[in-house]
Image: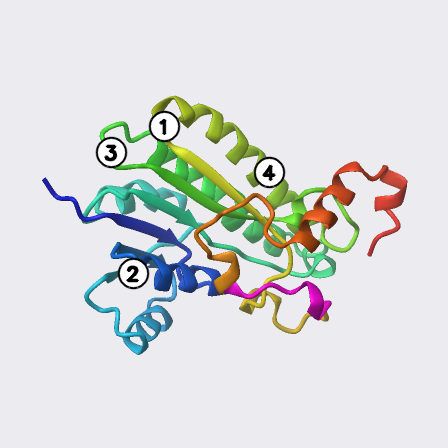
Amino acid sequence: MNKQRTVLILGANSDVAKQCILQYTAKGYTVFAASRDLISLENFITKNHMENSVQVIFFDAADFSSHQKFYEELPMKPHVVIYAAGFLRQNEQASKDFNDAFEMMKVNYAGAVSVLNIIANDFSNTNLERIISLSSLSGVRGRKSNYIYGSTKAAFTTYLSGLRQDLSSRNITVNVLISGYIRTKINDGLKLNESLIMEPEYVAGDSFTIVPNWKWKIIYWILKISPEFLVAKLP
C-alpha cells in the first residue's frame, strides 16, 4: 500500500500557497502544485531545492471545462486539498468593466466550486481528509470600497459552510480561512494599515482557525454584528 501523503494546492503561485508548499514538504508530503504560471512556480521550487517532493501541474481556475480532466490525471489522489487561487480588481474598475468583475467571480468562486465539487464527489478517493480554502473578511459584510470582490468571497464562504456539513459524514474536514490583509502580490500598491498586515507564512500555518490574528477576530465580529447604517460609513 502506498502510504505517501499528498497535498494538492490549487493556485499554488500565490504567496500563501508557496508558504504552504514549504510547510507541507517539511512534513514529508508530496505536493502537487497547480497554477497557470508554471515558470514562476518552478523557479520557486528550484530555489528552495524541492524538485524531489513537488510536482508542478497546469491548472486554470477559470477554465471550468478542464477541471474534470485535470483531476482525473493527477498522479495520486490527495489527502489534503488547498484552494488558494484568487483574483482582485479594484471596485471602481470592476464596477465599470464587467469583464474584470466576471474574472473575480470565476476565479474566486465559480472555479472553486467547479473543481472542489469534482474532488468532493470522488467517493473512490478514500485518502481525502481535509479541504482548506482561503476566503476573506471582505465577504463578511458588503462595503462600498470592495463589494464586488467581497461578494465573491461571501459566496465562497457560504459554499464551504455547506460543503463542510455535506462531507462531515465521510469524516472529511472543511476549513475556511477568513483572513484580513496579507502581505501578498494581490495587495501590491494598496495603502494598508501595517499593524494589521499578516505575513503569508503565518496564514499558511498548520492551525487553520476561522479567523487568524486577534485583531482580525475583533474586526470580524464588529463587521458581523454592526447595523447596516454603521457598515455603510466604512470606506
Q: Residue at x 60, y 38 (%)?
A: 155
Rounded to the nearest whole Å, what is the CA distance between mark 2 and mark 3? 22 Å
Q: Which mark is residue 25?
A: 2
Classify residue 175 as left or right of residue 118.
right
Q: CA distance from mark 2 to mark 4?
A: 31 Å
C-beta proximity under 8 Å, tags 2 and 4: no
Residue 47, label in figure: none
What's the mark number on residue 171? 1
Residue interval drawn in magenta: 193-200
Which residue appears at 61% of the width and 56% of the height? Answer: 100
- Mark 4 nearby-residue class (10 Å; few <14, some 14–19, many ≥20): some
Mark 1 surroundings within 10 Å by alpha-carbon count, few (fewer than 14), some (14 through 19), many (20 or more): few
> Which sits earlier in the primary sequence, circle 2 or circle 4?
2
Instruction: Residue type at mark 3: give it.
Output: Asn
Residues at discs 2 and 1 in contact (Cβ within 8 Å): no
Give, as a three-letter code, the residue at label 2.
Thr
Q: Position of residue 121 (x, y in %)?
A: 33, 29
- Of residues 23 and 231, the one drawn nearer to the viewer in this rendering: 23
Disc 3 crowd, CA 10 A, few/some/many (<14, 14-19, 20+): some
- For disc 3, the marked residue is 125
Label 4–label 1 contact, CB within 8 A: no
Q: How is the image coloured?
A: rainbow
* Residue pointed to by mark 4: 155
Secondary element at tag 3: loop
- Gap between marks 1 and 3, in whole Å? 13 Å
Q: Residue at x 47, y 49 (%)?
A: 207
- Magenta span includes 169: no
